[in-house]
Amino acid sequence: MTQTGRQPQARSLATRERLVRATIDEIHAVGYHAATTHQIAERAQVSRGALLHHFPSRADLVRAALETLLADGTAEIRSVSQDVRSGALPLADFVDFLWPLFSGRFFHLSLELINEARTDAALRESLIPVVQRFHAALDAIWVEFCDSESRPPREARIILNLTVNLMRGMGVQTVLRPDPDYFRDLIEAWKAVLPQLISGPAGDAAFAGPRFREAVA
């Protein structure tokens, strides 16, 4: 492709990126229902026609926004988990990293779309594959996170998904319970438990039940 041909393509990609980022910002600012395509186009500083060229429907735009949101979150989690695996970052700091991620902007945007998808079948069907890819990526990160000699892949996935689900539940609580000390107590308690799950007696006890013994057999 010539330099002249690359320039329009680059502008098109930049416009698409602005629209996706504007969608994320608009939904976070005003909520899913109030985030109109008109306001999104204004926020992105593009024309309505340009928006429709890249995203013929609002559903297409929302799907692309969620894909970008989850891709950003995955990249951030992978980077921090690699630092823990290499020893550059303590395990406790990983928990501290997860808490704002799953109680702040990233989490609340995800929650907004999850809540809408519960009663909107078309939206749900559109978003399920996106979320499945996100969880598959997380599972792969969790398997790399734990030493296979300490925990086999299935146990590693369970331990880290327990951690994420704890953070998500706490994140929901923050909406109507603005009590930082309460959440800090829960985080500090989990920071003490997590190492025991990964390579200690708590983990041995957690996976000693018949469901896990049968899986090994």
Image: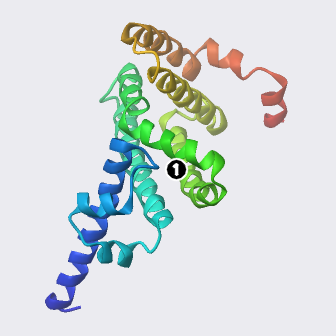
Q: What is the quadrant of residue 49 in the picture?
A: bottom left
The C terminus, quarter of image: top right
Q: Nearer the viewer, residue 4 or 52?
A: 52
Q: What is the quadrant of residue 1 in the picture?
A: bottom left
Residue position marked by numbered label 1 in the rendering: 134
Q: Residue visible at 53% across and 13% down?
A: 193
Q: Nearer the viewer, residue 63 or 90?
A: 63
Place of residue 54 in the rendered image (x, y in percent of width and height, measured from the top left): 37, 75
- In this rendering, position of residue 4 left or right of residue 197: left
Numbered disc 1: secondary structure: helix
Q: Residues within 10 Å of mark 1 (few under 14, many from 20)?
A: some
Q: Residue visible at 61% across and 30% down?
A: 151
Looking at this rendering, what residue extends furthest in the left direction? 3
Place of residue 21 in the rendered image (x, y in percent of width and height, measured from the top left): 30, 56
- In this rendering, position of residue 47 left or right of residue 30: left
Q: Is residue 191 above or below residue 19?
A: above
Q: Is residue 5 above or below residue 125?
A: below
Q: Is residue 186 above or below residue 214?
A: above
Place of residue 172 in the rendered image (x, y in percent of width and height, measured from the top left): 51, 26
Mark 1 residue type: Phe
